[in-house]
């Protein structure tokens, strides 16, 4: 009896196990630390130069063929727009926006917001259809054709960047800045916003070179800048990074972000997945054999008679 | 339905009629009543009136959502990409459906066949909960027709959601297989029934594996948002354990709740075995739930200690967290312990309802309320609420429809005697 | 619609300052008025009152760094340049390239001067210099305070006759 049951059991668990093997046990083999492509391009954004003219917003609108804005791009009343107590953010109709902040005891400071093109993007690692891609040129792009619309990337992005075309019925997809990859970056040209800026708030170049320039600027202009390059280390490093003359939190930046990539938080969990897949079957087989040793092994139907055994009623 | 006897009919409860004839499918569907009798009792049931009102309002809204886009029934928020459909539909329905693997394990793996009277109810509870979690997901996805993409077309294996998707899909199949035993019995397909019973242990073990992983994975989904979920509800080391461990009392208490509703409203459908055993089973399930709750309470506190977040307890968010933990973990734990010790079934049931409410609160806190705690809180769109209620009503109606028919709460007479 | 960025670049081809700035040989021999129209595209050319700015500033080096043969004011420049000698190039565009910063430029720096590695392009050189000072001394800083918007500019910024017709509430989410 025991023999038969064991064979029966093994057959059953083998079938279950086979189904499980199809699931992604290899997940935990995700790469170690990735510091970005060596030749990847980036943009140094110097907030001290920005005067809030919104030319970059207009340039982005033209380049990406975005819908007509509600207000002209030279209308500065948008800086006073507040929704849910928040300043403007990127949307499916505006991949970049400029906000004004008023730090205490300092002149207003303007901050341009767009995708920061992380070295190890949270959006990419959270996407279950692998729609996102970090290109060797440094852009984080995505394939709209496979987007299912789960919006996990919007949850994952630490900078609140991806937006969604909620109002599309048949083809709602994620929308965000792609570093003008299709039209410019892959030909080695800077994105439209960078090129349009009258103040060269943004400097385009290889991320590694720009990082040196950023630190040079801090060194060459003692007292002008806060001694920090936002995006050098944040969430594993970003392709776009920032210099500021006021503490970054006063310019609306989230300064609580970890220095390790977002995916590092998830790796511990991913590591237990293959463990559970391999250990559980043996463990519970063992439990089953121990628990049912010497007892009847039949199922269901023929047990109605002994249903009340083993418990005080 | 209580007046069923008034019609002079016994409900369909055996493979053969009392006169030895087979039941036709139509008779089975109508529970052995004539069409007029069936419709008559449907209309007399007040609960059906409530359902009818909900469906009359809600189903057009669901259709509206598919014709006029997701943006027309939600706030189309970029900051709260996941609203009630996932916050309630996915994150609450799944833990409440952990009952399937819990009771499957108890009965099949640990050989506690004395729990069999409740096993099928627990399995069905699991299946329906998962199924409707997927229904909520389909309503929420921008392009539900692409749901199969992560399965067959474009793989993102580094994503936790990929794991959730695969496991929920696989587990749903496992649960369909498990519950199909009852279905095969009902339609009288003996060979199918035998086939499924042979694979029971394999199915049950897969169920445990898949459940451990995806209950945990639902928690791990929030590991992508370390800055967005309030630290009290976030723990990079323990998040998956919090979700997994809390799913144990959640699933067990959900079974207690459902069985409570069943015993008060559908007693005609329960056989003597179910009725007789329910009291001690309720207490036994409550024991399991109490164990789960105490473990859960401890690891919640460990997480606070691990990240040294005690200072947050002094804030408004801390008060809200304490409300959740004291009111919906400690309180039911105390109630359940007292009820178990004094064998008070009614009190166990009250404790179970509070536990279920606590799980709802915890999941809603993590997914919506304490999410974006640095930004702002958003009250879901009214149509979003209506859709969520409607789908839940469909869930309840489906649940009842199946319980009325399949041998879940009762055994086929022939089967029991065999 | 014509790509505004491209138009801008075409404009850069017309590398002509209408002034005689480039051939000025003596420190004190400067034009009274300069029409800066190299980059004119979205905005009209700027008519720059050079004489007035000469009166208002501390010295030529306020704007011209070390190239005019007058004392160098910027400490960083002064480390290498004593400013005693007038350079061959004095005009902004002599040093500040009008072309966009591109990956190619960065890979093949056209200058041998290693300390000039962070040099703004011509458009930025103008704006940073002018606006930077205007902010400090309270000069005009609005775009159209110095140059009027062209029709191309209106189209680009969706202003003037190109202002969106839709009501403001269409901003959506």
Image: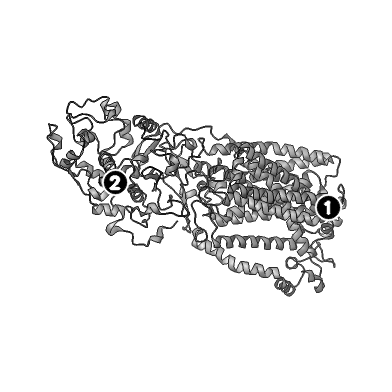
Indicate the colouring scheme: one colour
Return the residue nearer the eye: C159 or C5: C159
Please determine whether, in this image, residue C75 is positioned above or below residue B227: above
- Residue extending farthest to the front is A105
Residue position marked by numbered label 2 in the rendering: C5
- Residue C117 seen anywhere in this rendered image of the structure: yes
Q: Are marks 1 and 2 on the same chain?
A: no
Which quadrant does the C terminus of chain B fall into?
Answer: bottom right
Q: Which mark is residue B64?
A: none
Which residue does the image show at 13% across and 37% down from the upper left? C30
Q: Which mark is residue B343?
A: 1
Identify the chain of the residue marked 1, using the numbered disc in the image: B
Residue A311, position as x, y percentages in the image: 86, 48
Return the residue nearer the eye: A106 or B182: A106
Return the residue nearer the eye: A15 or C98: C98
Mark 2 Cα shell of 10 Å, populated few (<14), some (14-19), many (≥20): many
Task: Tell me if A217 is positioned left or right of C64 in this view.
Answer: right
Residue A104, position as x, y percentages in the image: 41, 44
- Residue A97 seen anywhere in this rendered image of the structure: no
Q: Which of the 4 image quadrants contains residue C159?
A: bottom left
Identify the chain of the residue marked 2, using the numbered disc in the image: C
Residue C138, position as x, y percentages in the image: 27, 44
Residue B283, position as x, y percentages in the image: 80, 51
SS of the residue under disc 1: loop
Which residue does the image show at 76% across and 54% down from the upper left? B120
Which quadrant does the N terminus of chain B fall into?
Answer: bottom right
Return the residue nearer the eye: B374 or A31: B374
């Amino acid at each position: 009896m025991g023999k038969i049951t064991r064979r029966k059991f093994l057959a059953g668990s083998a079938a279950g196990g086979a189904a499980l093997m199809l699931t992604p046990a290899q997940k935990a083999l995700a790469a170690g630390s990735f510091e970005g492509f060596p030749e990847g391009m980036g943009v140094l954004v110097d907030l001290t130069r920005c005067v809030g003219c919104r030319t970059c917003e207009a340039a982005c609108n033209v380049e990406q063929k975005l819908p007509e804005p509600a207000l002209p791009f030279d209308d500065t009343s948008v800086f006073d727009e507040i929704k849910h107590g928040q300043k403007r953010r990127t949307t499916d109709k505006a991949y970049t926006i400029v906000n004004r902040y008023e730090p205490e005891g300092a002149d207003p400071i303007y901050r341009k917001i767009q995708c920061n093109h992380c070295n190890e993007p949270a959006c990419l690692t959270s996407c279950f259809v692998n729609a996102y891609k970090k290109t060797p040129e440094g852009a984080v792009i995505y394939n709209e054709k496979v987007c299912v619309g789960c919006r996990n990337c919007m949850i994952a992005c630490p900078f609140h960047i991806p937006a969604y075309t909620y109002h599309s019925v048949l083809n709602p997809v994620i929308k965000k800045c792609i570093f003008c990859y299709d039209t410019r970056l892959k030909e080695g040209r800077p994105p439209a916003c960078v090129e349009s800026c009258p103040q060269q708030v943004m400097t385009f170049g290889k991320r590694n070179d720009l990082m040196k320039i950023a630190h040079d600027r801090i060194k060459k202009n003692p007292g002008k800048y806060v001694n920090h390059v936002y995006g050098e280390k944040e969430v594993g490093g970003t392709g776009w990074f920032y210099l500021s003359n006021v503490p970054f939190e006063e310019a609306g930046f989230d300064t609580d972000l970890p220095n390790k990539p977002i995916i590092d938080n998830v790796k511990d969990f991913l590591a237990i997945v293959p463990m559970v897949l391999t250990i559980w079957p043996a463990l519970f087989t063992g439990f089953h054999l121990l628990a049912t040793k010497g007892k009847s092994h039949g199922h269901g139907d023929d047990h109605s008679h002994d249903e009340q055994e083993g418990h005080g009623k | 339905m209580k007046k069923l006897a008034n019609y002079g009919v016994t409900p369909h409860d055996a493979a053969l009629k009392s006169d030895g004839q087979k039941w036709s499918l139509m008779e089975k569907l109508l529970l052995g009543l004539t069409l007029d009798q069936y419709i008559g009792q449907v209309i007399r049931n007040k609960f059906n009136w409530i359902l009818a009102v909900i469906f009359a309002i809600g189903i057009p809204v669901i259709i509206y959502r598919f014709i006029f886009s997701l943006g027309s029934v939600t706030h189309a928020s970029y900051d709260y990409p996941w609203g009630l459909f996932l916050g309630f539909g996915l994150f609450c329905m799944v833990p409440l459906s952990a009952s399937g693997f819990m009771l499957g394990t108890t009965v099949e793996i640990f050989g506690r066949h004395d729990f069999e009277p409740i096993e099928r109810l627990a399995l069905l509870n699991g299946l329906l909960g998962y199924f409707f979690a997927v229904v909520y997901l389909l309503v929420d996805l921008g392009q539900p027709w692409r749901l199969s993409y992560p399965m067959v077309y474009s793989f993102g294996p580094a994503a936790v959601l990929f794991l959730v998707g695969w496991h929920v899909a696989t587990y749903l199949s496992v649960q369909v297989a498990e519950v199909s035993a009852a279905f095969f019995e009902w339609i009288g397909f003996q060979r199918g029934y035998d086939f499924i019973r042979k694979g029971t242990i394999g199915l049950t073990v897969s169920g445990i594996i898949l459940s451990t992983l995806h209950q945990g994975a639902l928690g791990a989904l929030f590991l992508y948002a370390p800055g967005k979920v309030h630290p009290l509800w976030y723990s990079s080391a323990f998040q998956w354990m919090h979700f997994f461990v809390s799913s144990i009392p959640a699933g067990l208490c959900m079974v207690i709740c459902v069985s409570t509703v069943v015993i008060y409203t559908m007693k005609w459908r329960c056989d003597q075995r179910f009725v007789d055993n329910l009291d001690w089973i309720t207490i036994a399930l409550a024991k399991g739930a109490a164990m789960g709750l105490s473990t859960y309470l401890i690891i919640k506190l460990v997480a606070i200690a691990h990240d040294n977040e005690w200072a947050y307890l002094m804030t408004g968010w801390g008060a809200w967290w304490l409300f959740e933990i004291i009111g919906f973990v400690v309180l039911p734990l105390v109630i359940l312990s007292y009820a178990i010790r004094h064998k008070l079934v009614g009190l166990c049931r009250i404790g179970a309802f509070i536990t279920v409410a606590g799980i709802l609160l915890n999941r809603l806190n993590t997914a919506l309320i304490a999410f974006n705690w640095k930004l702002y809180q958003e009250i879901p769109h009214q149509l979003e609420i209506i859709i969520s209620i409607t789908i839940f009503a469909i869930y309840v109606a489906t649940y009842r429809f199946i319980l009325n028919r399949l041998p879940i709460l009762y055994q086929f007479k022939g089967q029991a005697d065999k | 619609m014509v790509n505004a960025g491209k138009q801008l670049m075409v404009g850069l081809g017309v590398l002509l300052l209408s002034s005689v700035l480039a051939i000025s040989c003596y420190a004190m021999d400067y034009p009274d008025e300069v029409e800066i129209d190299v980059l004119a595209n979205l905005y009209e050319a700027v008519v720059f009152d050079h004489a007035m700015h000469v009166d208002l500033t501390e010295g030529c080096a306020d704007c011209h760094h070390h190239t005019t043969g007058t004392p160098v004011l910027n400490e960083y420049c002064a480390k290498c340049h004593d400013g005693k000698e007038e350079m061959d190039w004095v005009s902004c565009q002599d040093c500040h390239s009008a072309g966009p910063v591109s990956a190619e430029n960065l890979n093949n720096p056209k200058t041998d001067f290693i300390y000039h590695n962070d040099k703004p392009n011509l458009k930025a050189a103008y704006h940073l210099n002018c606006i930077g000072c205007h902010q400090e001394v309270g000069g005009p800083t609005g775009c159209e305070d110095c140059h009027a918007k062209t029709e191309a500019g209106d189209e680009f910024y969706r202003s003037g006759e190109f202002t969106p017709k839709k009501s403001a509430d269409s901003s959506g989410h």
